[in-house]
Image: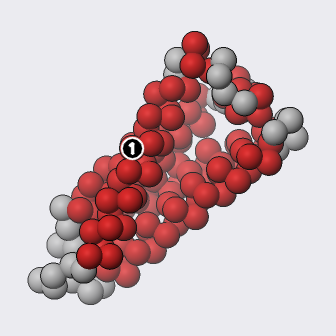
């Protein structure tokens, strides 16, 4: 078994923090009182979000947190967990762009959705690459 570099640990930790913030965001979106503080584009997306998109959002953030935790534990199951999280991000992002892009302030929604997609895809790519180097067992 190959010893991971500091970059491996840093990426795993930053990914875990990113996804933990996503989990916190998910929990905030379930609180009607907290929704009043969200920008109008975000409120529009949340108000028109069907149940399957909410489920995809939960899979995206909680699956991403689980995948990063598994990555830090050097488990090969991090790869499929992060891939499923990426699928959740794609579904959530598709709906958010469909509903929120036209709303006032929609550009910030597009930017945050794009960042989520980039981070999720990068984590999948990184774990796939590292699994081939015998860092995940």
Q: Position of residue 26 (x, y in %)?
A: 50, 33
Front-most of residues 107 and 49 = 107
Residue 89 vs residue 2: left or right? Answer: right
Q: Secondary structure at mark 1?
A: helix
Query: Quarter holding the N terminus?
Result: bottom left
Q: Is residue 112 visible?
A: yes
Give the mark count. Answer: 1
User: Which residue is found at the position 52% from the left and 22% from the top?
Assistant: 30
Q: Position of residue 125 (x, y in %)?
A: 45, 74
Q: Above or below — where is 82 with respect to 104?
A: below
Instruction: Bin the neighbour count of mark 1 within 10 Å (Cα to Cα): few under 14, some 14-19, many 20 and up.
Output: some
Q: Quadrant of residue 50?
A: top right
User: Which residue is found at the position 46% from the left and 27% from the top?
Assistant: 27
Q: Is residue 77 visible?
A: no
Front-most of residues 124 and 32 = 32
Q: Position of residue 2 (x, y in %)?
A: 16, 85
Q: Which residue is label 1 attached to?
A: 20
User: Which residue is found at the position 70% from the left and 53% from the top?
Assistant: 111
Q: Quadrant of residue 130?
A: bottom left
Residue 64 vs residue 43: left or right? Answer: left
């Amino acid at each position: 078994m190959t010893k991971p570099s500091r970059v491996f640990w840093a990426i795993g930790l930053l990914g875990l923090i990113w996804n933990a913030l996503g989990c916190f965001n998910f929990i905030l979106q379930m609180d009607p009182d907290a929704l009043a503080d969200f920008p109008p584009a975000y409120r529009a997306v949340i108000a028109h979000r069907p149940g399957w998109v909410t489920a995809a959002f939960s899979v995206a953030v909680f699956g991403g947190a689980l995948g990063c935790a598994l990555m830090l534990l050097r488990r090969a199951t991090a790869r499929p967990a992060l891939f499923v999280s990426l699928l959740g991000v794609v579904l959530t992002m598709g709906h958010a762009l469909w509903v929120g892009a036209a709303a006032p302030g929609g550009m910030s929604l597009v930017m945050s959705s794009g960042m989520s997609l980039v981070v999720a895809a990068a984590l999948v790519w990184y774990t796939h690459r590292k699994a081939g180097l015998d860092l995940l067992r």
